[in-house]
Image (cartoon, rainbow, N blue to C red):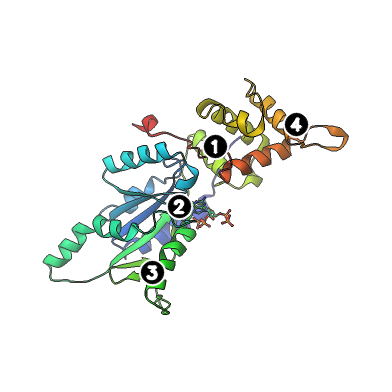
Amino acid sequence: MHFQWYPGHMTKAKRMMQENIKLIDLVIELLDARLPMSSRNPDVDELGKNKARLILLNKADLADEKQNDAWMEYFKERGYSVVKVNSKKGGGIKSIQGVIQEACREKIERDRKRGILNRPVRAMVVGIPNVGKSTFINSLAGKACAKTGNKPGVTKGKQWIRLNKNVELLDTPGILWPKFEDQTVGLKLAFAGSIKDELLNIEELAVELIKFIKKYYTGVLAEKYNITESEDAYRCLNEIAEERHCLLKGSELDTNKAALLLMDDFRCGRLGRITLEFPEDFR
Ligand code: G4P
């Protein structure tokens, strides 16, 4: 399997982000908690230099809690503010306002020394496609709008969402494309559903996922599908097809259907909380 991206999109998105980044104080970078490094675009450090930085480990509900904590530690050690969030259900969202103030303390202090008081921090959300940017913005802004009563909280022109008197958020997130030479990065993004499945061979993908889960989360597949977790990952896929009655006409096993089922179970968290990469491998 070979993964590719489209430079046309990347160039346009990057240009837009360079424009917008001039306007902001804080970069809120969304990462997928299941694959924080592989869902990072390395350009963000260059783009966001001289800005306050906040990393959100989104979809934390799908990732291994022990690894979530280890990843938080990893990024904190490197000077970022970090929060684990579940944008879909609102987990961790409440603490964001406080963390934003903390992350921008230097800027607020600098303003104060210059006699500028009460200028709101301006922030932009960035991240790769499908990491949850829109869900996060809705979750964060939803609460803020509710607080200001019936006012929509959105100003015309450049679209800023006023979260409260201290923070304004650019309503269009910055889309970064993941960047990789390393094909295992592509593979992990594909597992998570961040690469369109139409571009992939779903059975090959499922077989690779089976290999990973068997190795790092031994027993999970056996329990979920009542299979043996044999050495041969393709055989496991066959067993899943058997157990789940994925059959073609003539009672031949439909491994494509079994592969789709497995990928869906993984992506929705029905295999439990699974992290695809571990901080110790990046130290
Ligand atoms: P984007 O703007 O960065 O492209 O991402 P978007 O918000 O559209 O989110 C992509 C998918 O990820 C959505 O699922 C969304 O519900 C899901 N998602 C976002 N944040 C979280 C989270 O913290 N936890 C979990 N479990 N899922 C999250 P979808 O399948 O496209 O839509 P739907 O299932 O919500 O209908």
Give the mark, 2 or 1, whose residue is nearer the N terminus: 2
Q: Identity of the amino acid at label 2?
A: Asn
* CA separation in Å, label 2 and label 4: 34 Å
113 relative to 255, above or below: below
- Per the image, label 4 sits on a secondary structure element best described as helix
Residue positioned most to the top: 231
In the image, taking residue 94 as reference, residue 257 lies left or right, namely: right
226 relative to 53, above or below: above
User: Can you tell which mark lies on residue 144?
Assistant: 3
- Per the image, label 1 sits on a secondary structure element best described as helix
Residue at which label 1 appears: 187
In the image, taking residue 262 as reference, residue 18 lies left or right, namely: left
Tell me where residue 84 appears, x and y as whole percent.
39, 48
Q: Identity of the amino acid at label 1?
A: Leu
Residue 16 placement: quadrant? bottom left
Q: Is residue 238 visible?
A: yes
- Per the image, label 3 sits on a secondary structure element best described as helix
Tell me where residue 51 appears, x and y as whole percent.
27, 56
Question: Looking at the image, do the residues carrying marks 1 and 4 touch, with CB atoms under 8 Å apart?
Answer: no
* CA separation in Å, label 3 and label 1: 37 Å
Give the mark, 2 or 4, whose residue is nearer the N terminus: 2
User: Can you tell which mark lies on residue 86?
Assistant: 2
Give the mark, 3 or 1, whose residue is nearer the N terminus: 3
